[in-house]
Amino acid sequence: MAFNFFLKTITVLLFFILSLYPFIVTSRNLKELSMLERHENWMVHHGRVYKDDIEKEHRFKIFKKNVEFIESFNKNGTQRYKLAINKYADLTTEEFTTSFMGLDTSLLSQQESTATTTSFKYDSVTEVPNSMDWRKKGSVTGVKDQGGCGCCWAFSAAAAIEGAYQIANNELISLSEQQLLDCSTQNKGCEGGLMTVAYDFLLQNNGGGITTETNYPYEEAQNVCKTEQPAAVTISGYEVVPSDESSLLKAVVNQPISVGIAANDEFHMYGSGIYDGSCNSRLNHAVTVIGYGTSEEDGTKYWIVKNSWGSGWGEEGYMRIARDVGVDGGHCGIAKVASFPTV
């Protein structure tokens, strides 16, 4: 009797579980279908085309993994920043790092010693405003896109020169990253480089002159140097900023500054907010600090950074990084290799 009751109970349970199976499978398929549709829409939006179905399937798996990570991260809701599904969402972190981060600090030994031995130009600055944004003063060109070439160093150097020239002459000129990429051969082209080495190239070979972006447009690859280019802007030298945030602040008050950062996995998918997350163990990406401020919500201080990954990344191509966090060299090492050109 008891045994028969047990069999009936097991039978009922099995029937119930089996009746749920189509629903479980259907739900899983719907979720997968939804992700497939999102990938298709994302491809259309960003103009992404794959060479065959094998590559498409491979990229879909990466896209799906990244999207799930982004949504899980954002649901946590405890961070001061959010991640976003941007045009790089079908790349692994390793692929993104290889193609888009090209700061090479091993080249520090090549920068001219005079840049590090002269006194810091802005050392005597004692008062700074509560905030600064060089975009509002017309000293920053539009956000550019380095594409799949790791020449962030060239974009950082050019942006700093553009800003310095505009401040001195009240004229904003978009300058040629391609000239630096092709001709500054002590740097490593798309494999990496350093802003101060780019400044040294201009001073030693071009009389400090750099041409316009229009005259020497960006090609997303290192090519043969086109010599004898007319100089639109001439720098007289450059300085290295002492590697602390107080000195960086004094410099940014006066002009946009080239810096290196230790970008980690989350930079790939940064969307908005003040980045105070984890950092890489080494400096690997070059950007330009174009201002600073303080959050009205919670008083968090931040740097305003211009990147070179297009306007669809981050806050319309910009990022805010936590400031004065009590770490030597600043959050993600932002003050460790700061420099600026003089005009």
Image (cartoon, rainbow, N blue to C red):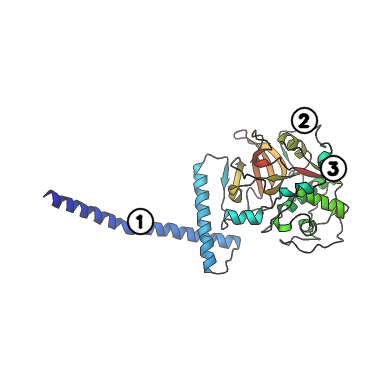
Of callouts 1 and 3, the N-terminal one: 1
Report the number of numbered marks: 3
Amino acid identity at mark 3: Thr
Residue at image point 83% right, 39% down:
117
Disc 1 to disc 3, C-alpha distance: 69 Å
Please report contact status of discs 2 and 1: CB closer than 8 Å, yes or no.
no
Q: Nearer the viewer, mark 3 or mark 2?
A: 3
Q: Is residue 58 visible?
A: yes
Secondary structure beneath label 2: loop
Q: Alpha carbon of mark 3 to alpha carbon of mark 2: how far?
A: 27 Å
Give the amino acid at mark 1.
Ile
Q: Which badge, 3 or 2, comes first in the chain's sequence?
A: 3
Q: Secondary structure at mark 3?
A: helix
How far across and how far down the image is residue 49, in percent? 58, 66
In-image side of 170 versus 88 (left or right)? right
Q: Quadrant of residue 341?
A: top right
Residue 32 position within the rendered picture, expressed as x and y whole percent measured from the top left = 44, 59
Residue furthest to the left in view is: 1
Circle on res. 114: 3
Give the class, few, some or many, for how many residues have Cα within 10 Å of label 3's Cα (few <14, many ≥20): few
Q: Which residue is mark 1?
A: 24
In this rendered view, identify the residue nearer to me: 285 or 298: 285
Q: Indicate the position of residue 17 as horizontal and vertical percent values.
A: 28, 54
Binning the other alpha carbons within 10 Å of mark 1 as few (below 14), some (14 to 19) or many (20 upward) gives few
Name the mark on residue 68: none
Sequence-wise, which precedes: disc 2 or disc 1?
A: 1
Residue receiving disc 2:
127
Residue drawn at point x = 21 percent, y = 53 percent = 10
Q: Amino acid at mark 2?
A: Glu
Q: Is residue 87 something one can see in this rendering?
A: no
Looking at the image, which is closer to me, 98 or 343?
Answer: 98
Residue lying furthest top in this view? 126
